[in-house]
Amino acid sequence: MHIVPLDTTNKAQFDDFYAIYCASFPLSEQKSYEELLRMGSSSFYTIFTAQYDEQTLGFCILFHDTNVDFYLLEYMAIDTQKRSLGLGSKLLLASTEVLIKRYGLKPLLIEIDSPEKPSDEQHIREKREQFYRKQGARKIDPFDYILPLNSDEAPPPMELLVYHPTLTHISKENLKRWLEILYTNVYGCDKNDARIEAMLKDTPPILNLI
């Protein structure tokens, strides 16, 4: 298996990636085919894919604006037939190593469905959180994340995890700045979006990573 950036001009390869993407995330969390094409062509994004014998086994989409002091793992998935083989860990490690070598060490933010809320996909959500925690990611506590997708469907309850080898807490002020960047640079929302204030309303000045 080797990890390579997705070539968005290769339609067959992009369609293989898109098939895994659509099968892995609820419709309310998905971006359109055209949006993903734009992301894959942007200097602020890299879609890393796990390839074996010209077959796409999985992918992760990482946001890495050089003017921003964090990375964002926006999506990550492995083909349903190839899960539980350790491919996800290898993909995430190899992809983040590329970014660190290019742009330096920064906190990696990870958006996940909250396993703490009742859901038909409870087991999947729990496994996903366990996977990222096993890699060393921590949950921002106390904090509930509102995913700002432009969709007719209500976004599911979310969590924002943070991976960094030494970071143990963040300030409310810094979290607010991260949220403003996520909402504007990643999702095209307004910096003063009311959902940001709603998320921060009851948070303390310092939030622990647990």
Image: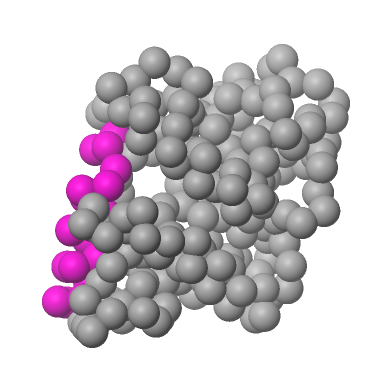
Above or below residue 31? Residue 105 is: below
Front residue of this view, candidates 181 and 206 = 206
Does 56 sit above or below residue 106? below
Q: Residue at the location (59% across, 48% down)?
A: 134
The quadrant of the picture occupied by the N terminus is bottom left
Residue 100, how many percent across, how many down?
Answer: 67, 73
Q: Where residue 90 sits in the image (x, y, percent)?
A: 48, 68
| Residue 124 shows in this picture | yes
Which residues, given as a range, are shown in magenta? 11-28
| Left or right: where 145 falls relative to 118 | right
Is 113 positioned to the left or the right of 208 in the image? left
Residue depicted at x 60% and y 53%: 135
The overriding secondary structure of the stretch rendered in magenta is: helix
Asked if residue 15 lies in the magenta stretch, the reply is yes
Q: Which residue is situated farthest in the front direction here?
A: 85
- Closer to us: 208 or 128: 128
On screen, residue 93 above or below 142 = below
Left or right, 85 with reference to 166: left
Residue depicted at 81% across the width and 49% down the height = 167
Quadrant assignment, res 120: top left
| Count of marks, rendered view | 0
